[in-house]
Image (cartoon, grey):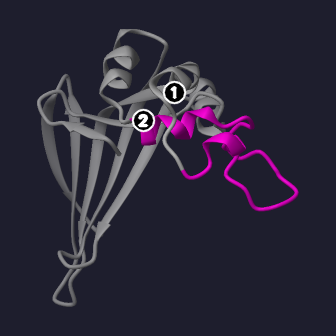
Amino acid sequence: LRKFDSLNMVLNFHTDFRSPKVFSLKQNNNSLFVFYDYKLKIQLRIKTVSIINNQNKITEQIWEKTKLVSRKCYLTEKAPSSETDFPEDGIDKKLKGKEPTLEESKQGYKNFTVVHNQIKEIDWLYLASSGHRRLKITLQEKIPSFKWIIP
């Protein structure tokens, strides 16, 4: 998770365009985020609709702010989740242990992807020995409606 836009109710994450999750989101743009805070004993299940951004104004703006060390992740020769015969990260040997130059990093831009996830529903669950509580929050055009439900 890279950003939460509370005004527009959008969760953003970055990924590699070649990753299986991008392929999956192209097939079905519904996604689900699950967060749990054990200290607060609160779980959130957040249903969203995902929009894939690759090589557009959104990715250009975010790519420009991305540090070289982070850009390095998008320079792998093999796609994420590719099988390999030995443990490796897929980064070219010439970049092992160092940041790429600005020029070297530009090759990774084609793989850099920002996924916007428009929140449609939040399932809030509070877990307590004194009694659990669960609330369903549905967003229609950013306007929330609330319903208590049995946990």
Is 76 contained in the magenta span? Answer: yes
From this view, report whether residue 124 is shown above or below residue 30: below
Give the amino acid at mark 1.
Answer: Ser
Is residue 16 positioned above or below 63 on the image?
below
Q: CA distance from mark 2 to mark 1?
A: 7 Å
2 and 1 marks in contact (CB < 8 Å): yes
Front-lying residue, 133 or 103: 103
Q: Residue at x 76, y 62 (%)?
A: 87
Per the rendering, the mark at residue 57 is: none
Q: Residue at x 59, y 31 (%)?
A: 22
Q: Is residue 67 magenta?
A: no
Q: Nearer the viewer, residue 32 or 143?
A: 32
Q: Residue at x 31, y 67 (%)?
A: 36
Pointer 2 residue: 68
Q: Residue at x 59, y 27 (%)?
A: 17
Tell me which segment is drawn in magenta: 68-97
Secondary structure, magenta segment, majority class? loop
- Numbered circle sitting on residue 105: 1
- Vertical comparison of 117 with 73: above or below: above
Give the side of residue 19 with respect to residue 112, left or right. right
Name the residue nearer the viewer: 17 or 87: 87
Residue 132 screen position, x and y as percent:
22, 77
Q: Percent x, y for residue 60?
A: 38, 15
Work out which quarter of the rendered image holds the C terminus and state it.
Answer: bottom left
Callout 1 secondary element: helix
Give the residue type at disc 2. Leu
Q: For mark 2, give the secondary structure.
A: helix
* Above or below for 92 versus 42: above
| In the image: residue 63, left or right of residue 79 | left
- Point out the residue furthest to the top here: 57
